[in-house]
Image: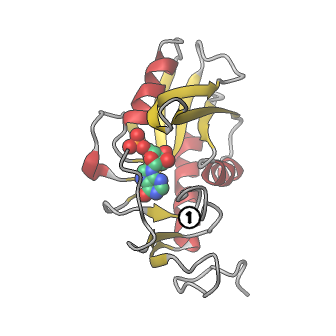
């Protein structure tokens, strides 16, 4: 018996899935890879009680699956950012709108991301965290789009490389839709009207 309505690479019809193109990663493939990442992290960080940090909201799906597969004690915390410029009503520079509750100094930080594209967002956040004096700072991303990388990121753990396409599901949204799909699919070009601002 399948665990959800979306366990295969065939997309069922319906309102939620109408705008989707090809499935790039199935739920089973994603879960298998998360298990492998969790095993590696559990081994590398044994005895270090790392602090896993994620950016709301997209990472919650990956973070919760990763945490449940990790077999060592860890602490988790989240930050939130905004890329919206209220004055100009367009995309603006990244701003931190919710900081960590945990202190960073002397801790082993593992930054957990859903997707890295240009790397500019993450680069900005890593600079802020590095300035707080962690004992170590590494990055784990589930999805990686290497083609437009503009900032150098210390990527220690990576789930999947993705092609330069706009994809949704497993935390990734298009205008706040599709995040909760348990697989990753391309968005059909006719649905995709990326903000150029
Ligand atoms: P970066 O600063 O270019 O690395 O931006 C990364 C952010 O862009 C992610 O946190 C996502 O919010 C967004 N993003 C990049 N590619 C995609 C995609 O294919 N689907 C959904 N969001 C994406």
Identified at 62% across, 68% down, the residue is: 181
Taking depth in this image into account, of 172 and 126 the one nearest to the observer is 172
In this view of the protein, can residue 158 be seen by the observer? Answer: no
Judging depth in this view, the residue of 107 and 188 nearest the camera is: 188
Coloration mode: secondary structure
Give percent across and percent down for residue 149.
Answer: 28, 43
In the picture shown, does residue 158 fall above or below 183? above
Quadrant occupied by the C terminus:
top left
Residue 89 seen in the figure? yes
- Whether label 1 lies within 8 Å of ligand 1 gets the answer no
Q: Categorize mark 1 by other alpha carbons within 10 Å: few (<14), some (14-19), many (20+).
A: many
Q: Which quarter of the rendered picture does the N terminus lie within?
A: bottom right
Residue 97: quadrant of the picture: top right
**For the point 58% across and 13% down, which residue is it?**
106
Residue at x 59% of width, y 49% of height = 58
User: Element type at marker 1?
Assistant: loop
Looking at the picture, how far across and down is residue 152, in whole percent?
30, 33
Please state if 22 lies on the left or on the right of 5 as rendered.
left
How many numbered tags mark residues here?
1
Residue at the disc numbered 1: 169
Q: Position of residue 103 (x, y in %)?
A: 66, 16
Q: Where 122 sits versus 129, above or below?
A: below
- Point out residue 147 in the picture as x, y percentages from the top left corner: 26, 52
* Image position of 73 (left or right of 24): right
Q: Residue at x 53, y 26 (%)?
A: 95
The correct choice, above or below, for 85 with respect to 144 in the image is above
């Amino acid at each position: 018996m399948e665990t959800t309505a979306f366990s295969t690479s065939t997309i069922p019809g319906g309102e939620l899935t109408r705008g989707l193109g090809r499935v790039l990663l199935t739920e089973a493939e994603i879960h298998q890879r998360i298990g492998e990442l969790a095993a590696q992290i559990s081994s590398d960080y044994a005895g270090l009680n790392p602090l896993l940090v994620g950016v709301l909201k997209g990472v919650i799906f990956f973070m919760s699956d990763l945490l449940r597969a990790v077999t060592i004690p860890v602490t988790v915390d989240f930050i939130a950012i905004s890329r919206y410029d209220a004055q100009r009503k367009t995309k603006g520079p990244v701003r931190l709108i919710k900081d960590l509750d945990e202190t960073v100094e002397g801790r082993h930080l593992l930054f957990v991301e859903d997707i890295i594209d240009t790397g500019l967002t993450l680069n900005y956040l890593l600079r802020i965290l590095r300035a707080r004096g962690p004992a170590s700072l590494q990055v784990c991303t589930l999805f990686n789009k290497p083609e437009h990388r503009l900032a150098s990121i210390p990527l220690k753990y990576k789930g999947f490389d993705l092609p330069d396409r706009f994809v949704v599901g497993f935390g990734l949204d298009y205008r706040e839709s599709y995040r909760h799909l348990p697989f990753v699919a391309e968005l059909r070009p006719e649905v995709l009207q990326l903000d150029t601002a």
